[in-house]
Image (cartoon, rainbow, N blue to C red):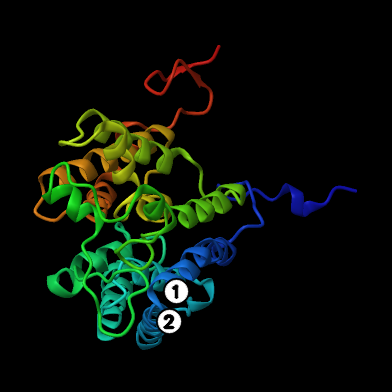
Amino acid sequence: MINKENLIVTVSPHLRSDDNTRSIMGDVIIALLPTLVMAVIFFSYRVLIVTAISVVSCVLFEYLYELLLKKPNTIGDLSAVVTGILLAFVLPPSVPYWIPVIGAFFAIVIVKQLFGGIGKNFVNPALAARAFLMSWPTIMTTFIAPFATGAIISSATPLVTLKGHAGVIPGQNLFQMFIGERGGSIGETSALFLLIGGAYLVIRKVINLRIPLIYISTVALLTFLFPMGYGRVYFMLANLLSGGLMLGAIFMATDYSTSPVTKYGQIFYAVGCGVLTVLFRYFGGYPEGVCYSILIMNCVSWLLDKIVPPERFGTIGGIFNVKKKQ
């Protein structure tokens, strides 16, 4: 007896997976937890408060927007939670508590919901919110030293030292930068635990290595070739371990909604992110360039998919040859 359900023809895609938005976002949250724990160790419990405010604000704004406009409730897919964590991760530990609230409104309502909700935003919500919050530059560029207690102790990040004092070694050595014992935003300091989180996402097949590996490799190559008064290897490693490169390459640039879907599009996208990051770091007025680099490439990811479309089924000869197989 033939099961009639097996004969029903539906629109593509025809492949099915056990993964859904909720499970994918759950994996991303798990991958971010080690970095959050290290941030609490280095910058105190205040990190948890900022993160909690950011997450609750993102979830609340998504719920209220969908309630007021009578749209289906989507807070259960956990995407707003992920946005809240990532938003907190790109903020300094010392920010006033109203900053993540404003950032959450911009990320969820302006960047995500007004464009149709999850999957329809064309730039990363957390990074767009960070760019918007640079309207308060003093707040957004005041960082505290690890293990600072009592009054806030302003601390220059390694990138500030590398950019402003050619040849001067930053206060933290490379090992300290690797584990996260340096000034910076909440979730960007510990390259070690960001890499652990990234490895978890690769194992779970939430992301592939193409975008983060090419992005980081591009920055490594350019900083090695143009060391700006430092030893090549030291300058390269200091740039890889400083700023938001690891966080951006692993958790931001790989966002499904805002990155290309084709293989060659992803390659050009990642190279573009790397080149722009180095250009911003070398010639920009602000020592960091990851945020704006990813946002710019988000805006052209659709174009990259059009320029280098995937190979059509039943063709041979590469992506530009559409000759049919005989």
Q: Which mark is residue 323?
A: none
Circle 1: residue type: Val
Q: Is residue 301 visible?
A: no
Residue type pointed to by label 2: Tyr
Residue 64, horizontal then vertical, whole percent: 37, 87
Q: Quadrant of residue 152?
A: bottom left
**Count of numbered marks:** 2
Horizontal side of residue 245 vs 102, given as left or right? right
Question: Which residue shows up at 25% across the image and 45% down it?
Answer: 300
Q: Which mark is residue 45?
A: 2
- In terms of depth relative to the viewer, which is nearer, 66 or 245? 245
Q: Position of residue 70 (x, y in %)?
A: 40, 84
Q: Position of residue 117 (x, y in %)?
A: 38, 68
Vertical arrangement, residue 203 with respect to residue 264, above or below? below
Q: Is residue 285 visible?
A: yes
65 in relation to 202, above or below: below
Residue furthest toward the top?
Answer: 326
Density class for disc 2 (Cα within 10 Å; few <14, some 14-19, many ≥20) is: few
Please state, as top left, top right, bottom left or bottom right, where the C terminus lies in the image: top right
Q: Is residue 223 above or below residue 250?
A: above
SS assignment at label 2: loop
Q: Quadrant of residue 275?
A: top left
Residue beneath disc 1: 40
Q: In the depicted view, which residue is nearer to us: 277 or 114?
A: 277
Q: Earlier in the sequence, mark 1 or mark 2?
A: 1
Q: CA distance from mark 1 to mark 2?
A: 5 Å
In the displayed structure, 302 sits above or below 19; it is above
Quarter of the image holding residue 71?
bottom left
The residue at the far right in this view is 1
Mark 1 in CB contact with mark 2 (< 8 angstroms)? yes
Q: Locate residue 83, reporting x and y percent.
A: 40, 69
Q: Secondary structure at mark 1?
A: helix
